[in-house]
Image (tube, helix red, strand yellow):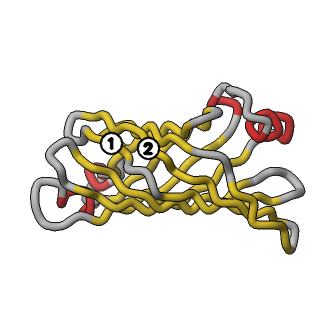
Amino acid sequence: MTDFAELIPALVFEFQMRVEVGTPVEQGTRDGWRYRDVPIVGGTVHGARMRGVVLSGGADAQSIRLSDGFARIDASYALRHEDGTEIAIRNLGIRRGPQEVIARLAAGESVNPALYYFRSLPTFEVGAGPHQWLTEHLFVCIGKRWPDAVELDVYRVT
């Protein structure tokens, strides 16, 4: 039997994004969910192959289950690499944790990210060129929610 251990996926850290956010715009509640849009107002990107800024103008459309604070995240925004290339991102994710921890996040407190689960799956759109590798791989993010920003550690799946 052939050993296919080399095919088992691994994660390789690529970069960190600090996505600065504005005041959420509430969209109402229905069917046990609260809906809101969180404006993306800027930020930074740091890594060996990715350095640049998060552009203002995107948003994070969230649906939050009223019973326990479980959140579905659907963020769309753009980056500008330091070489001038613009890169579009759509980032789908979830955030969950004990209700008392989620309540502290909702109140705008700084909470240790080890106390909740926040993961996302970004996809990137960019034309041919030096950043095309972003469109040709899968990625996973570990998220950390702060009062004025979200930090995303971006890992490439091998």
- Taking the view exactly as shown, the residue that stands out farthest to the left is 129
Q: Are marks 2 and 1 in contact (CB under 8 Å)?
A: yes
* Vertical placement of residue 20 versus 133, above or below: above
Q: Position of residue 65 (x, y in %)?
A: 80, 60
How many angstroms separate mark 2 from mark 1 (CA)?
7 Å
Residue at 45% in and 37% down: 18
* Vertical placement of residue 47 versus 30, above or below: above
- Taking the view exactly as shown, the residue that stands out farthest to the bottom is 31
Q: Quadrant of residue 10?
A: top left
Give the number of the disc on residue 45. none
Q: Nearer the viewer, residue 1 or 145?
A: 145
Residue at image mark 1: 53
Q: Position of residue 158 (x, y in %)?
A: 29, 51
> What is the number of callouts on the image?
2
Q: Residue type at mark 2: give it.
A: Gly
Helix, strand or loop at mark 2: strand
Q: Is residue 48 left or right of residue 35?
A: left
User: Mark 2 or mark 1: which comes first in sequence?
Assistant: 2
Residue at 86% in and 74% down: 31
Task: Sort mark 1 into few (<14), some (14-19) or many (20+) by Cα contacts within 10 Å.
Answer: many
Q: Position of residue 11 (x, y in %)?
A: 36, 43
Residue at image mark 2: 42
Helix, strand or loop at mark 1: strand
Q: Position of residue 29 (x, y in %)?
A: 84, 67
Residue at 85% in and 35% down: 100
* Vertical placement of residue 143 versus 75, above or below: above
